[in-house]
Image: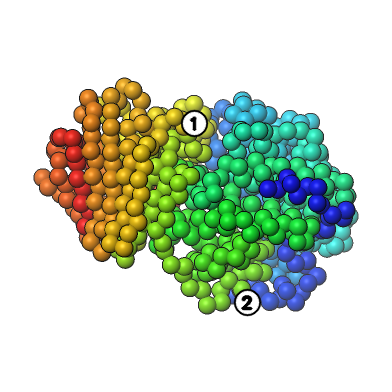
Amino acid sequence: MFSEISGELPDVLSDFMPGSAYSDRERWNAVPHAVRDVVVRDAEATIAGAWPLITASDYRDYTETGNRSRFEALYFTRRRMLNDLVLGELVEAGGRFLPGIVDGIVLIAEESGWQLPAHNAYGRGGPRLPLPDTSQPVVDLFAAETAALLATIVALLGDELDGISPEITARVKREIEARILTPYLGRHFWWMGSGDERMNNWTAWISQNVLLTAFSLKTDQSTRRAVVEKALDSLDAFLKDYAEDGACEEGVLYYRHAALCLHGALTVLNSAAPGLFDKIWLQPKVRNMAEYIANMHVAGCYYFNFADSSAVVEPCSAREYLFGKAVGSEMLADFAAADRATADNPHLPGEWNLWYRVQELLVGTLTAAEPHPAPLRDIFYPGIGLFLARDGQFSLAVKGGNNGEGHNHNDVGSVTLYKNGRPLLIDVGVETYTAKTFSPRRYEIWTMQSAYHNLPTFSGVMQSAGEAFGARDVEVEFGAESTRISLDISGAYPPEAEVHRYRRTVTLLRGRHVEIVDAHDGDKPAVLSLMTCVAPTVTSEKIDLADLGSIVIDGAGPIEIDEIEVDDTRLRSAWPEKLFRLRVPLVGKRLTLRIV
């Protein structure tokens, strides 16, 4: 799709401006006063603080302990501080934040490596080196993000920085050339794509930021052409691993680093060669990819989640709105505008990508005009086996697919259910990333295991990881009175589970209740786990979940309850301090749950 366009590129590839330059006072003065005040206050707080010191020991901490968060807190704080100062200067235009901006630029320029310690490797899954090799830069997600940040600053504030010293922008350009453009054009990194090798969010995310960097700076035409040609190949490699339905197998959180970064890359390309990429925007697959986030929404901050996604996701921004407009989806544009209206902060204070934050200030007022939410709909994504159904009371998801997907959890057949916008049966999500998260020991982590999803276990035997372990014989029906999915999940278990068949049928009877029927044929006893964040009360015939609802059970033995203390920061962003696992033994070959 993309690489075919390489031969049609114009002789001259145009610049890209990631927003409006400092000198465009009319545009920056149009930012609403309430937003301007918040931006300036953040910049004032930043300039009154101290820049984090990053030592070699901080960098080495990851390879020594596996902890990612300590170094990353220092690293991302620097970038957010620089963001805050730049935005403060852009909206105020008084010059008082420029010295701090220079300090931040030079500090980042003097870092030994822009790649995270967790990504400091030269091969996919290769050993992480304890310190950066300055002679062989690694282009990872955040090296590319850093380059995009600095290139955006130069594009928007270059004349003001040159007024202090031309060496500032010259230094930025030298560092980007050495750390990003030269290795990008001269080496092959795994995320660039190679034959049938599966890609993930890295491909679109890094390609977007390299394109943003090359076209925001005054790079020469030969460099631009080489970057575009390589990026087009990578974007094809990225797209090949999406089904036509557009579902992101890495979950809704990674939509913003995958499909939404495809939009960012296309935005830059469209500026470089106007009109040439129009046919990409019009592809049904790209539109499906765009609309995925709206279809995954439940209510408020809750989304259907699986893989390494949280159930609680930040509200949409101008990016989703612009994506909707670009692909001709008023549904997505309306959803994003309505969702954005719920945001506590209008300027993305937690974001490290300056371009996104600039868009939010300059485009945000457009998205705020009469927002109205998109209608929620039933949908089945066959590419990943994801079933979604809703009525006025229940929001239901069932995950089929297989256990070899990106950011996989062993969750084939798991059910997620909300009632009146509140979580009833949950997907816990993932804890704070560590070295173990992306190691051969990944499935030792409890949140990755099928026993902590809404799934059966057979004498302690859980589902296995890998593409070979998946759902079979999937049947889906959507109707006016009811909708259902039926699938055999026995293939997700290893031979030692001794399960010949485990057919799960989940039905939403609209306006009434949800029914789960599990039919089991196996040689080992089955125990069904049910995960909830509401303290349950169990009787012989049902489970009461406070004021949320009840689960009426037929075919179960005595139910046991495990209390799980939640002290992980990432999990606590979505859940209370305690979660509950109900262990429901099947006494026969059939278990029925009716959720009311």
Q: Is residue 166 left or right of residue 472?
A: right
Question: Who is closer to the viewer here, 556 or 427?
Answer: 556
Structure colour scheme: rainbow
User: Image quarter for residue 181?
Assistant: top right
Residue at 52%, 77% (x, y): give it. 370
Q: Is residue 452 visible?
A: no
Estimate the spatial distance between the alpha carbons at disc 2 and disc 1, rounded to whole Å: 46 Å
The C terminus lies in quadrant: bottom left
User: Image quarter for residue 92?
Assistant: bottom right
Question: Who is closer to the viewer here, 231 or 66?
Answer: 231
Q: Is residue 489 visible?
A: yes
Q: Amino acid at mark 1?
A: Lys
Is 587 situated above or below 568?
above
Question: Which of the two labelled residues, at mark 2 and mark 1, occupies the earlier sequence position?
Answer: 2
**For residue 33, which numbered disc appears in the image?**
2
Residue at 67%, 45% (x, y): give it. 235
Q: Residue furthest top?
A: 496
Q: Amino acid at mark 2?
A: His
Is 401 situated above or below 64?
below
Question: Who is closer to the viewer here, 452 or 13?
Answer: 13
Judging by the rendered image, the residue that carries numbered circle 1 is: 436
Residue 186, horizontal then vertical, whole percent: 80, 34
Residue 476, horizontal then vertical, whole percent: 36, 49
Q: Residue furthest left?
A: 540
Is 33 situated above or below 111?
below
Residue at 15%, 41% (x, y): give it. 555
Number of residues whose C-alpha sits closer than 10 Å to that of mark 2, classed few (under 14), some (14–19) or many (20 or more): few
Residue at 68%, 57% (x, y): give it. 279
User: What SS does tag 2 mark?
Assistant: helix
**For residue 266, which numbered disc appears in the image?**
none
